[in-house]
Amino acid sequence: MKKGIEIRIRGFQDGDAEEAAAIWNQVVEDGEAFPQEEGLTAEEALRFFKEQSFTGVAEEADSGRLLGLYILHPNNVGRCGHICNASYAVRRDARGMGAGESLVRHCLAQARALDFRIMQFNAVVKANRPARNLYQKLGFRELGTIPGGFRMKDGHMEDIVLYYYLLQPEKETGKS
């Protein structure tokens, strides 16, 4: 992490919409991690981020500049509604400063607070080594690989890796 940068995580606020949309759209434009192909306007972002179970933002404590964000929501409904999913976006010029790890750690705590039992990632691009290294460092378990599951911006296909993380003790999830 870059010296002198203090990162604070807080809940999304209406006034964050434009800056959050810009960060989200950078990841969409990169075409290497998110499945979306179209960016969000500030109005669409406001609606989208408020629809989530929780949207967290990472900001530089001194300046209040947004460094990144995450969205947290159920992965499914009904009998699988206890499983959540999340997506993370970090501003290009803030990558490698610790914002991503701060966002994931906060997201896991928030998921527990919302009584989710499992975090599941459905489509982590295999070539996204920084994200995969972080998830492994934090204790996510790899479920498997789907060959050619993601179409990169340049059109070639990349494998995707599925991950999960037990938010509650294993004995409570039905395992012995």
Image: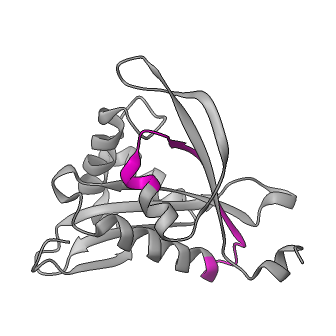
In the foreground, 81 or 143: 143
User: Relative to the observer, which residue lies in front, 93 or 51?
Assistant: 93
Report if residue 121 is visible in the image.
no
Picture quarter containing residue 39?
top left
Above or below, comparing residue 155 to residue 171 in the picture: above
Q: Is residue 109 left or right of residue 20?
A: right
Residue 122, magenta (yes or no): yes
Q: In which quadrant is the C terminus drawn?
A: bottom right
- Judged left or right of residue 62, residue 135 is right
In the displayed structure image, the side of residue 45 where residue 68 appears, left or right: left
- Asked if the magenta segment contains residue 116, the reply would be yes
- Which stretch did the figure color magenta? 112-132
Residue at image x 37%, y 69%?
A: 101
Q: Would residue 29 be seen by someone viewing this image from the given angle?
A: yes
Question: How many numbered markers are drawn?
Answer: 0
Q: State whether residue 32 is above or below residue 95.
A: above
Place of residue 23 in the rendered image (x, y in percent of width and height, measured from the top left) = 27, 50
Q: How far across and how far down the image is residue 148, in percent?
A: 57, 25
Is residue 175 positioned above or below 15 on the image? Answer: below
Q: Residue furthest top?
A: 155
Residue at 51% over, 63% down: 136
In front of the other: 54 or 169: 169
The quarter of the image holding the N terminus is: bottom left
Which percent across, then down, holds residue 88? 42, 56
Q: Position of residue 151 (x, y in %)?
A: 48, 24
Q: Residue at x 67, y 45 (%)?
A: 144
Say above or below: 156 vs 57: above
Which of the 4 image quadrants contains residue 55?
bottom left
